[in-house]
Amino acid sequence: MATRSSDTPSKPVPAERPAGRTRASAKGEQTRARLIAAARTLLAGDGSIPFTTRNVAAAGGVTHGMCHYHFQDRTDLILAVVEDIRPEWITPLEEAVGSPGPFAERAERVIGLLSRPEGADLSRLHSALHWFALNDDRVRASLAGEYRRWRACFVTLYQVLAEERRNGLDARTLGEAAAAAVDGLAAIQSLDEEVDAEAVVRAVVLGLASTGTGR
């Protein structure tokens, strides 16, 4: 059996990550997640408990100092919540629009998705975030960015239709109109559960598609 010569360079052995650092990092992520969850709970609450870093820390079961270790102030917490809820309302729409298929198939996926009632907690969260956006420029900028991303989904949907028709359809105008209408529907549904969401969404999405050039 041949042996390796003593002057043959050996392959470097990757340095092992200190176990303590890995555990500390995981614990830090868990603490951060608990604080975000607590922030969501307070924001979606009835307002009886003021939204402060101290109250979020108490709800999350951590010290006030640890809360400030992860988040400088309550605005940082709110921004984290804005990012945290993205998979619950924007990502599914992006997937529905971005998955392969002609306009008709993508539109049906969008209609099906938007016809589902928004959860009460998510609805209250959006209301709270809008209120903070009126009083905090950082929250306003963050939330505005999320809504731009949400509206872009509708523009992309009608861009698919424009490519199919090749008739100069104004995808941006139609997309923005659909987004505004659907956003208004969500507000109406929060007050009147008898609204036929699927019929309204279908009328908006397909009705705009039948307007020709959209100009």
Image (cartoon, grey):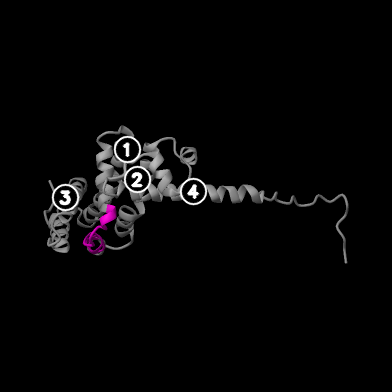
> Closer to the camera: disc 3 or disc 4?
4
Q: Are marks 2 and 1 in contact (CB under 8 Å)?
A: yes
Q: Residues within 10 Å of mark 4 (few under 14, many from 20)?
A: some
Viewed as shown, does residue 34 lie left or right of 4?
left
Name the residue rendered at 31%, 52% in the picture.
90
Query: Circle 2 sits in a helix, a strand or a loop, which is it?
Result: helix
> Closer to the camera: disc 2 or disc 4?
4
- Along the viewing direction, whichever of 41 and 33 lies nearer the viewer: 41
Name the residue rendered at 17%, 63% in the picture.
198
- Residue identifier under label 3: 184
- Along the viewing direction, whichever of 30 and 93 lies nearer the viewer: 30
Viewed as shown, does residue 42 lie left or right of 190?
right
Question: Which range is magenta?
Answer: 107-122
- Residue identifier under label 4: 31
Q: Amino acid at mark 1?
A: Val
Q: CA distance from mark 4 to mark 1?
A: 23 Å
146 lies above or below 194: above
- Residue identifier under label 2: 82
Q: Amino acid at mark 3?
A: Gly
| Nearest to N terminus: mark 3 or mark 2 | 2
| Nearest to N terminus: mark 1 or mark 3 | 1
Q: Position of residue 71 (x, y in %)?
A: 44, 39
Q: CA distance from mark 3 to mark 2?
A: 20 Å
- Residue identifier under label 1: 139
Q: Are marks 3 and 2 in contact (CB under 8 Å)?
A: no
Q: Residue furthest bottom?
A: 1
- Along the viewing direction, whichever of 19 and 196 lies nearer the viewer: 19
